[in-house]
Image (cartoon, rainbow, N blue to C red):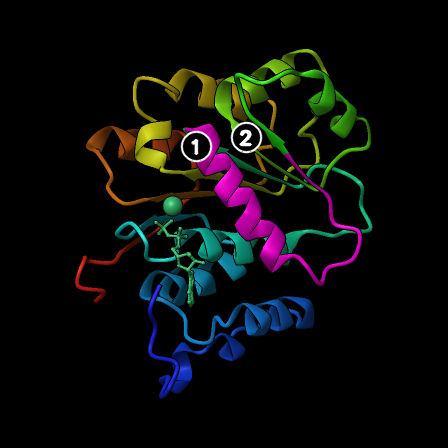
C-alpha cells in the first residue's frame, strides 16, 4: 500500500514501539516506515497483552498489525505452538503466512506451518512432528489435527481470527468454538476484520476478555 514515507509523523513510525531489534530490522527491509492507522491504534494494546477487536478497511495492513503483535510474544527457544491464526480461505492463509514469514525473517529458528483444507495431510503431519511456533490455517483442518492429537495448543499464547466476521459467521463459528476448547483460557485473542456483524460481538463476549475495540473508517481516520 502507499504510505507517505517522505515525512512520517514521529509518533506513527514503528520505531516508537517497543518491538525487538529483529522485528524493527524486518520492517526496515520491507520498507514499512510509517504505521497505518489500524497498526498505530491496535499495536499498543496488543503489546500490553490486551484482547483486541480491530475493524479497518481491506488493504489497511491488518495482517502486519497482528503479525507484529504475535511475533512479539513468541519465545523461539520454546518449541511449542504459541500462536494460531485462523483464516476463511486457503489463499488468505498462504498470504498471511507469507507476511508473517517476511516479518519473522530475522528471528532465528522460528517455525511456521500452514494447515489448509483440500490438500493432502501427510506433509502437514510431518511438519507437526516438531511443534511449529506458529500455525496459520483453516478452521476445519486445524480441528482435524487437534482431534487426532497431531496439533497441540496447550502452550498457545495468541489466537487470531482474521476476517473474523466470516470466521464467526455460520460457516465457521462452531469449528472456531471447538478449536478454542483446545486452547488455554489464559491467552490473548485478537479479532481483525473489515466489518463486524452484531453476531461477532456476541461471540466476542464468549471468546475474548475485555477487548479493546478499534474502528478505523475508510478515509483512514
Ligand atoms: P488487510 O488485511 O487490512 O486487508 P493487508 O494486511 O493485506 O491488508 O495489507 C495490505 C498491504 O499493505 C500488504 O501488501 C502489506 O504488505 C502492506 N503494508 C502493511 N503495513 C504496511 C506499512 N506499515 N507500510 C507499508 N505497507 C504496508
Ligand atoms: Mg486481511
- Residue 153 picture location, percent across and down: 66, 29
Residue pushed farthest top?
A: 148
Q: Which residue is mark 1?
A: 207
- Residue 142 visible in this rendered orientation of the protein: yes
The correct choice, above or below, for 82 with respect to 59 in the image is above
The one nearer the camera, 187 or 163, is: 163
**SS for tag 2?**
strand
Magenta residues, start to end: 89-113
Q: Magenta span has 98? A: yes
Badge 2 local density, few (<14 within 10 Å), some, or many (20+)?
Answer: many
User: Marks 2/1: CA distance?
Assistant: 18 Å
The correct choice, above or below, for 159 with respect to 99 in the image is above
The residue that appears at 35% across and 88% down in the rendered structure is 7
Q: Magenta span has 172? A: no
- Residue 188 visible in this rendered orientation of the protein: no
Task: Determine which quarter of the picture holds residue 171.
Answer: top left
Q: Quadrant of the C terminus?
A: bottom left
Q: Which residue is mark 2?
A: 137
- Residue 19 picture location, percent across and down: 59, 69
Task: Determine which quarter of the picture holds residue 205.
Answer: top left
The residue that appears at 45% across and 34% down in the rendered structure is 91
* In-image side of 138 versus 7 (left or right): right
- Residue 48 picture location, percent across and down: 52, 61
Contact, CB < 8 Å: mark 2 with mark 1?
A: no
The correct choice, above or below, for 137 with respect to 173 in the image is below
Say which of marks 2 and 1 sits in front. 2
**In the image, ligand 2 is in what quadrant?**
top left
| Count of numbered tags | 2
**SS for tag 1?**
helix
Mark 2 or mark 1: name the one nearer the start of the chain: 2
Amino acid at each position: 500500500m502507499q504510505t507517505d514515507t517522505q515525512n512520517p509523523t514521529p509518533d506513527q513510525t514503528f520505531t516508537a514501539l517497543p518491538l525487538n531489534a529483529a522485528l524493527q530490522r524486518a520492517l526496515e527491509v520491507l520498507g514499512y516506515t510509517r504505521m497505518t492507522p489500524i497498526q498505530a491504534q491496535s499495536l499498543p494494546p496488543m503489546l500490553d497483552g490486551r484482547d483486541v477487536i480491530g475493524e479497518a478497511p481491506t488493504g489497511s495492513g491488518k495482517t502486519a498489525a497482528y503479525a507484529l503483535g504475535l511475533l512479539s510474544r513468541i519465545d523461539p527457544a520454546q518449541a511449542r505452538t504459541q500462536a494460531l491464526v485462523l483464516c476463511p480461505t486457503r489463499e488468505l492463509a498462504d498470504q498471511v503466512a507469507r507476511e508473517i514469514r517476511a516479518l519473522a525473517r530475522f528471528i532465528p529458528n522460528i517455525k511456521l506451518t500452514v494447515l489448509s483444507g483440500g490438500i493432502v495431510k501427510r506433509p502437514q503431519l510431518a511438519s507437526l512432528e516438531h511443534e511449529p511456533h506458529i500455525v496459520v490455517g483453516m478452521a476445519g483442518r486445524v480441528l482435524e489435527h487437534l482431534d487426532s492429537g497431531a496439533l497441540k495448543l496447550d502452550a498457545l499464547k495468541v489466537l487470531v481470527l482474521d476476517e473474523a466476521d466470516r470466521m464467526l459467521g455460520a460457516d465457521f463459528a462452531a469449528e472456531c468454538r471447538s478449536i478454542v476448547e483446545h486452547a488455554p483460557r489464559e491467552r490473548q485473542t485478537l479479532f481483525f476484520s473489515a466489518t463486524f456483524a452484531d453476531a461477532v460481538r456476541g461471540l466476542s463476549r464468549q471468546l475474548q476478555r475485555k477487548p479493546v475495540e478499534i474502528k478505523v473508517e475508510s478515509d483512514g481516520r
